[in-house]
Image: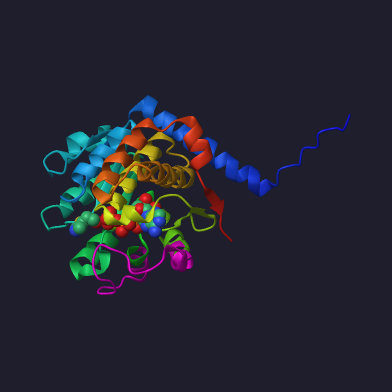
Amino acid sequence: MEEKQTIPKTQKQEEEENWGSKAWKLLTKVREKAPLIQCITNYVSMDIMANTLLASGASPAMLHSINEISDFTPHVHALCINIGTLSPDWLPSMKSSATLATQLNIPWVLDPVAVSASDFRLKACLQLVGLKPVVIRGNASEILALSTASVGSDKGVDSSQKSTDVVEVAKSLAQASGAVVAVSGAVDIITDGKRVVGVHNGVPMMQRITATGCAVTALIAAFLAADPLRPFEATASALSIFGVAGEIGMDLAKGPASLRMHLIDSLHGLDQKSVFSGVNITSMP
Ligand SMILES: Nc1ncnc2c1ncn2[C@@H]1O[C@H](COP(=O)(O)OP(=O)(O)OP(=O)(O)O)[C@@H](O)[C@H]1O
Ligand SMILES: Cc1ncsc1CCO
Ligand SMILES: [Mg+2]
């Protein structure tokens, strides 16, 4: 009888399969641990961000008053700071919460929404970067503007650049800041300044729902709470899981409004099989 031949897997194939298992482990941990995630975020994103966190198994709390930071932030498992509707009243809360988180080894994530829209926003963001976020997640225009500290380079909260065009910029920002940098887009780029991976999940219609980027930044915070010592893996896994939920949701959606609903439903219902077959993360040169 002819012997069945098994073709040995290449190291690259094995690494790519491992990502499915890593992402599933982290999602399972978020579901088991239900980490408390503090979000100081913009008015537009509060609802989708809190619902994304809940659907993942985490516990969101949108507390931003300066009067509450010193009591509350020390008890959270991770913090998400988003400057989308920044005003001078909110900046002290953001700085105070970020400072406490860094002092107490609580992982925190920065979302530099529309960082190049004004000098005020850019300065605030650079100060927040100085307070040592563990992860910075933005779209390509935001990461480019933050890295080059430039005002007026894009039109608002949406990107006019491609994530794959700013890989080197993302690497330098990671090296300069000490943070893992994630650039969302058709391919999400994640780098710690040395390693670079690309997440090939998600659907283009996710850009037609406001604050999906903000929501995935909060999901990164939840995954960091599950594995604080491996921010690179947590970040890539969170982006991939969110993308897989978008792909499954898209099968039932009729447009952006129903995709929003089905994405959240899919995130809540994700099982091991869909994660193993859906997660698509590759090493980038
Ligand atoms: N062309 C695309 N194909 C697949 N997925 C995409 C595409 N563009 C964006 N995404 C996904 O949509 C989500 C939001 O990314 P996006 O780059 O639009 O963020 P953003 O500009 O910061 O959004 P917002 O400011 O509205 O929160 C991410 O999960 C990303 O992977
Ligand atoms: C539309 C919008 N404007 C400020 S924040 C925000 C949500 C998407 O970033
Ligand atoms: Mg954004």
Magenta region includes residue 156: yes
Q: Say how the picture is coloured.
A: rainbow
Taking the view exactly as shown, the residue that stands out farthest to the right is: 1
Image coordinates of residue 222 in percent, x first then y, are 35, 38
Q: Nearer the viewer, residue 193 or 176?
A: 193
Image x and y of residue 234, in percent: 44, 42
Q: Point out the residue furthest to the top here.
A: 32
Q: Quadrant of residue 74?
A: top left
Query: Does 248 sit left or right of 72 as displayed?
Result: right
Q: Residue at x 39, y 39 (%)?
A: 223
Q: How many marks?
A: 0
Which is more toward the observer, 14 or 269? 269
Residue 13 appears left or right of 52: right
Query: Residue 151 placed where, x, y %?
Result: 26, 73
Q: Is 31 covered by the magenta stretch?
A: no
Reply above or below: 219 against 199.
above
Asked whether residue 18 is in view, the answer is yes
The N terminus lies in which quarter of the figure? top right
Quadrant showing the C terminus: bottom right
* Residue name at image x 42 percent, y 41 percent: 241
Magenta residues span: 143-170
Dividing the picture into quadrants, the one containing residue 178 is bottom left
